[in-house]
Amino acid sequence: MKLWHLQAFFWTSLIVLACPVQGDEISVAVASNFTGPMKRITAEFEKDTGHKVLASYGGTGKFYAQIKNGAPFEVLLSADDETPAKLVKENTAVAETQFNYAVGKLVLWSARPGLVDAAGDVLKTGRFEHLSMADAKLAPYGTAAMQTLKALGVYGVVQPKIVTAENISQAYQFISSGNAELGFIALSQVLKGGKIEGSSWLVPPNLYTPIRQDAVILNKGKGKPAAEALMKFLKTDKARAIIKSFGYELS
């Protein structure tokens, strides 16, 4: 091989090694309760695969409506298992891709220390003016909150005090800002380093239907390497460790 051929080969090799593998972009609709874990998972996923995640966070019910109206989402990380199943049934999502990535936990929380007792009896005493919770018609955690209030037999008493939020993130904002003294949110929103600031009551799981959160590839993401890579990554030990650290159970 001539010298100039060797030199050309050498510099070409350096350029190839210096240029990182270009991944694809993927548009993901993420249930707002999963914001914290998803941001950490995204960072690890992008670092490991070269793909880029464009995540939108919001209520599952609103995402469903947007997807049905043609929103360009390729993957849905839902706050329930019913919405992905419904999208599959309506031929809007890929059936064989649906799987459970987390089981959520409901918590009654207040930013004020001492307000919420360890047994949740504050709901029976009614010593508060406003109780925040996500819309039960749109948000699975709102449904769980409603089921809890009814199971405890206090819904009729506290109903006038309920401040309905569009989604679980807004419910958290109402409580953290003091606009509502307490409310029902996802444990993942307030669990930091294994501790919860303020005061809280972890709602016993027998008081509400299990919050099984499923992921599914939507039709717009069918056959796309980035979508398939994300679903695979969510099942890895690395991703599952992150999910568990936010208080979720794993199936």
Image: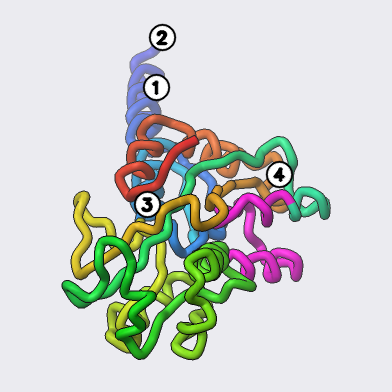
Disc 1 from disc 3: Cα separation: 44 Å
Q: Secondary structure at mark 2?
A: loop
Residue at image mark 1 = 9
Which amino acid type is marked by label 3?
Pro
Magenta residues, start to end: 60-85
Alpha carbon distance from label 3 to label 2: 54 Å
Q: Is residue 14 left or right of residue 53?
A: left
Q: Is label 1 or label 3 in front?
A: 3
Residue 49 falls in image quadrant:
top left
Q: Is residue 34 magenta?
A: no
The residue that mark 3 highlights is 37
Whether tag 1 and tag 2 are in contact, CB under 8 A, the answer is yes
Residue at 49% x, 60% y is 55
Of callouts 3 and 4, the N-terminal one: 3
> Residue 64 magenta-drawn?
yes
Q: Which residue is mark 2?
A: 1
**Percent position (x, y) of residue 204?**
41, 53
Give the color scheme: rainbow, by chain, secondary structure or one colour: rainbow
Marks 3 and 4, Cα distance to the nearest angstrom? 24 Å
Describe the element under mark 3 as helix, strand or loop: helix
Q: Is residue 57 visible?
A: no
